[in-house]
Image (cartoon, rainbow, N blue to C red):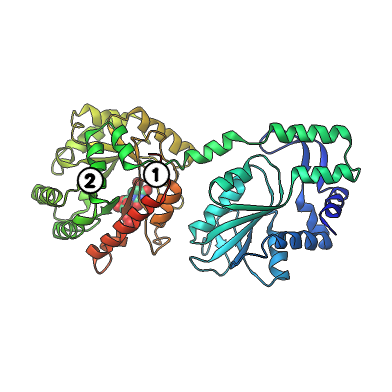
Amino acid sequence: MNKKELALKLFDLGVLQFGEFTLKSGLQSPFYLDFRRIVAYPDILKNISEQLWNLVTDLEFDHLCGVPYAALSLSSTMAVLHSKSMIVKRKEQKKHGTKKMVEGIYQKGDTCVVIDDVISSGISMIETLEALEGEGLKIKHVLSIVDRMQGGAVMLNDYGYEVRTVYTIREVLEYLKEGGKVNQKQYTDTLVFIETNRIDFEQVRARRKQRTSYSYKKIGKEAKHPVAKRLTEIVLKKKTNLCCSADVKTSAELLALADAVGPNICMIKTHTDNLSDFTPEIIEELKKLAEKHNFLIFEDRKFADIGHIVMQQFTAAPLCIADWADVVTVHVVAGSSSIEALKATGKLDTTALIVVAEMSTQDTLTDQKYTEKAMTIAEQHSDIVLGTVSQNYRSDNPGIMMLTPGINTDRKKDGLGQTYNHPDEAFAKRGVDIMIVGRGIYSSDNPRLQSEIYKKIGWESYLKRDNDA
Ligand code: 5BU
């Protein structure tokens, strides 16, 4: 069966339908593609799988993966016919056992070709790609039977993937017209629909919004708070976007770590309430080291209470955070009053805020809605907010940095809810400005060397990406 015969057959089997259909997005479409039906027709399934396979015969790769669920039958058939390994991306995370999102046998760095039945907006394809890439798989090529020509393929191309499809919807339509399966009106209506719905700009833009990235020069120029400007100066001077999270238990350990990693970091992040022997003197020592190595001190206090309490927590002895921290974190779960309260202390001339917009834990409640609202609050206070802690979203305001914890080159999780991304993923794909690394550095045998390695990886990844200067 050639491509035209296959298209006619698919029409006869009800896979390609013409009429009036409401799509998931609410859009009215004059045609509908239902490839789920093909599992009932083994010969057709085999034929389509061979057509898809023909698209990759020139490539070398390790695995096939179908976007769940519609393309699972396609990837399975291709894998069986051509003795190729297949991996499966779960649609929902498993509640028990391994909680793995990707099943199969693979290693970091393996290459994978991803298949979907139809590419429309490209969003479900992107979700699968992100999950696979999160596991360290490398993806360059994506396949589908039909490109609906609505912008998904353009967006995927934009992200650097090469899209190969058996048909475009326009080709299908031509075959069906030639074969007498669609009348003139259906042909015209469908063509007009395709041409007028070519790119789903909203969705493309929504995805891109998370991925904007800026140069440190631009960030420094647009940032309003003096501490934010100083941070970008340090980053550029020392060529480091590494913040070391010094989550140690004693002041001696903190000072030793700060001195060891000092040359390689732009900031040290502390949880001083975790120090068993805290005294105001250790802050004086830490400040000396900050001066010696030129880094900022970031107290990750995560203020989260009503304004009245937040004011006390920021200024109260023995920690007196307001007197020494260059930067502090604040949650906005209580709304913007937490930020307003910190401002009301009159101590924010020398301390800038970081809003926790999205957490790194695997079942965090900071979903997209929460994060967007937190981001808005941060943007409304750009005179005192240096950045947001987030995993996927970056503010459109270049002056508000994206700081990301949950970074580790070797681990994916810590067994207590923490999840990790590789620095390259963070900088290149998510638009991160500052990476925060804790155990990846201080738990190693040689924190100084380890911080140097992270510094170099972070800087290389920053240089590699396409920054909006
Ligand atoms: P780790 O050892 O690299 O996992 O340490 C991460 C640090 O970042 C730790 O101090 C946390 O308090 C901090 N953190 C985080 O891991 N995830 C978050 O979403 C936020 C902070 Br907010």
* Residue that appears at 22% across and 58% down: 248
* Amino acid residing under circle 2: Ile
* Between discs 2 and 1, the one toward the N terminus: 2
Q: Nearer the viewer, mark 2 or mark 1?
A: 2
Is residue 435 shown to the viewer in this render?
Answer: yes
Vertical side of 348 occupied by 172: above or below: below
Crowdedness near tag 2: few (<14), some (14–19) or many (≥20) residues, C-alpha within 10 Å:
some
* Amino acid residing under circle 1: Ser
Instruction: Identify the residue at the far front of this view.
Output: 58
* Residue that appears at 74% across and 61% down: 49
Q: Quadrant of the C terminus?
A: top left
Q: CA distance from mark 2 to mark 1?
A: 22 Å
User: Is residue 156 shown left or right of residue 244?
Assistant: right
User: Is residue 240 shown left or right of residue 291?
Assistant: right
Residue 242, given in percent of the width and then of the height, sits at 29, 52
Is residue 335 shown to the viewer in this render?
Answer: no
Vertical side of 259 occupied by 218: above or below: above
Is disc 2 in contact with disc 1, using a CB cutoff of under 8 Å? Answer: no
Residue 157, given in percent of the width and then of the height, sits at 58, 47
Instruction: Identify the residue at the far right of this view.
Output: 180
* Residue that appears at 33% across and 37% down: 218
Crowdedness near tag 1: few (<14), some (14–19) or many (≥20) residues, C-alpha within 10 Å:
many
* Residue that appears at 20% across and 29% down: 345
Which residue position holds label 2?
234
What mark, if any, has residue 159 been given in the picture? Answer: none
Which residue position holds label 1?
390
Quarter of the view holding residue 301: top left
